[in-house]
Amino acid sequence: MKLSQMGFKPINCLIHEQDGKVLKETDEKRIEDIMNRKSEYVIVYNPRDEQRKEILQVMDFDGESKVSVEGLRLLGLIERLTNIDLGLESGELTVDEALDIINNPNAMLQVVAQVVNSILINILKEQLMMAEEIAQLPEPVKRSILDETINKEKREEEAKKQAEIEELEAKLKALRGE
């Protein structure tokens, strides 16, 4: 197998209705064919690295063994990982409307939620495998990895803060007319 064949595939699957049934397609040729023939479908995208980090941050860990993403958080992930515009990011969706969607999803949204949940499970599996591999390393190596991870997180946080400061300063200058 060539490395080019192993590259990142942006589309996880396509979900559509046919003859009253909700179907999920993963074959690239079938996806392309459906996209050319139909206008009503949902594309579920594979998350990129930055999205994976965001996903891990919105997961609820109960401190023991239960992990979940429910309610508005799940709808937010659906909006980020699909071509569905729920209006959450733009503020068009009210809390009551969101609760109605959560409590009364249609068949299409249920399948989309299942696919998004399977993506979440895969991300968690990857995290667990990395943790198991790290646990087997000698203590000095583990300490080095931990220190580097902490330093990287600090650098990223500082960069975000600096970007926010610069953005606010630019807005302040614009308000002042400078």
Image (spheres, grey):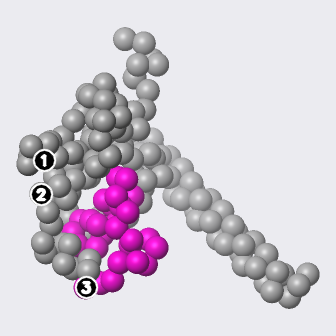
SS state under label 2: helix
Instruction: Determine crowd level at label 2: few under 14, some 14-19, many 20+ residues with C-alpha closer than 10 A.
Output: few
Residue beneath disc 1: 22
- Name the quadrant of the N terminus: top left
Vertical side of 137 occupied by 124: above or below:
below
Residue beneath disc 3: 96
How many numbered marks, from 0 up? Answer: 3
Between disc 1 and disc 3, whose residue precedes? Answer: 1
In the image, taking residue 69 as reference, residue 143 lies left or right, namely: right
Q: Nearer the viewer, residue 42 or 26?
A: 42
Instruction: Determine crowd level at label 1: few under 14, some 14-19, many 20+ residues with C-alpha closer than 10 A.
Output: some
Residue type at mark 2?
Ala
Residues shaded magenta: 69-96
Q: Nearer the viewer, residue 41 or 103?
A: 41
Residue beneath disc 2: 107
Between disc 2 and disc 1, whose residue precedes? Answer: 1
Q: Residue at x 57, y 54 (%)?
A: 152
